[in-house]
Structures are given as structure tokens and as C-alpha cells.
Amino acid sequence: MAERVPLDNLAQPSQRTPAAFFRTTRQTDIWLLAGILLLMGLAFWMIFTEFGDVLLRRGPGSVAEMDQVAFTAETGVQLVVVAMTAGDGMIDIRFRVVDPDKAFVMHDWDNPPTIIDHDTGAELWRTRHDGAHDDDLHAGVIYSHIILNGSGLIERGERIDLRVGDIVLEDIPVQ
């Protein structure tokens, strides 16, 4: 028969040291390390599959980083941002007027500003203006021009070309 140990000799939970609680074996350490590496790999995979196209994209990351000297000289406007809006059903083109005398091309209804899909060459030009502002443009003011994206041709993160008048600004990132 087994020898009975008095309860007074057993260490109470309050008497155990924290170091004794965290003692591990080599096998436990290996499993812990494997689990951490697996979680890190999973996190990397999730981030890369979600944002890989953005991380690997070539060219400027925003409109502010683009070289617009020739475009601004010809059109009198400087592109500020191109962004999806209204549940991706519209493309918002924001531009700052630099030369009001040249900037009228943004309101040329016979030759409206046209978005060209950089990859396919498909064009969107159907505008949604409806008198959001008068046609008298002022230097230094940022205006908005909305183009309908009803077909869902353009998506966030893609790159487009913008034709205004006779000049085309290429490889514009869409936010």
C-alpha cells in the first residue's frame, strides 16, 4: 500500500513560485516556436494577398508624387486626387486651377475629360456635373469633376490615364 503524505507537506498554490509555473520542456519550446512562426506566416500571407498589388505597384503611389508639369502647362490645372466614391459608382477627379484661362478645358462639353483604363484602353467620359459650380474658374481653388463608373470598369488601386483636351496624363493611381 502506498505511503500517505500528510497534507501539510504539499505546497499550496500560493506558495508556488512564478518561475516554477513557467517552466517548459524543450518539446514545449519547439511547439511554441512553431506556433508563433505559423501565425507570423499566416499574417504575412493575409496582408500580402490583400494588399500585394499595392505593395508591388510601380510608379508613383499618389497623384501628389506625379510629374504634372506638361499637363499643367497645357490644361491650366493640377490634378490633386482621383478617388472612387459613391460605392465605387463614381470617380471623383479633384483638380486645382493654376491658370483660369486654360482651365476651361475641364468644362468642354464637346470634348469632356475622359478616363482611360490604363490596361484595357476602355474609356469613361459620362460626367455628373449638374452645376456643382459655375464655369468661371478661379486660380488656387480646388474643383471636383465626377465621372460615372456605372459599368464598374475602374476599381480602387488601379491605374488610369486622364485625357483632357488634347493631352493625356498617364499612370494615375486611383484611391
Image (cartoon, grey):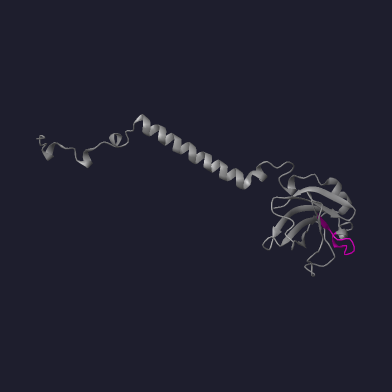
Q: Give the residues drawn in magenta, as a range.
A: 106-115
Q: From the viewer's perspective, is residue 30 above or below residue 45? A: above
The quarter of the picture where residue 90 lies is: bottom right
Query: Closer to the camera, 173 or 48?
Result: 48
Q: Indicate the position of residue 7 as horizontal and vertical percent values.
A: 12, 40
Give me the residue at 52% from left, 42% from top: 42
Q: Residue at x 45, y 35 (%)?
A: 34
| Front residue of this view, candidates 32 and 92 | 32
Residue 47 locus on image (x, y percent)? 58, 45
112 falls in the magenta region: yes
Q: Nearer the viewer, residue 91 or 120?
A: 120
**Left or right of residue 110: residue 22:** left
Q: Quadrant of the N terminus?
A: top left
The prevailing secondary structure element of the residues shown in magenta is loop
Which residue is pictured at 74% across the width and 61% down the height? 151
Q: Considering only vertical position in the picture, is 82 above or below 36?
A: below
Q: Which residue extends farthest front?
A: 1
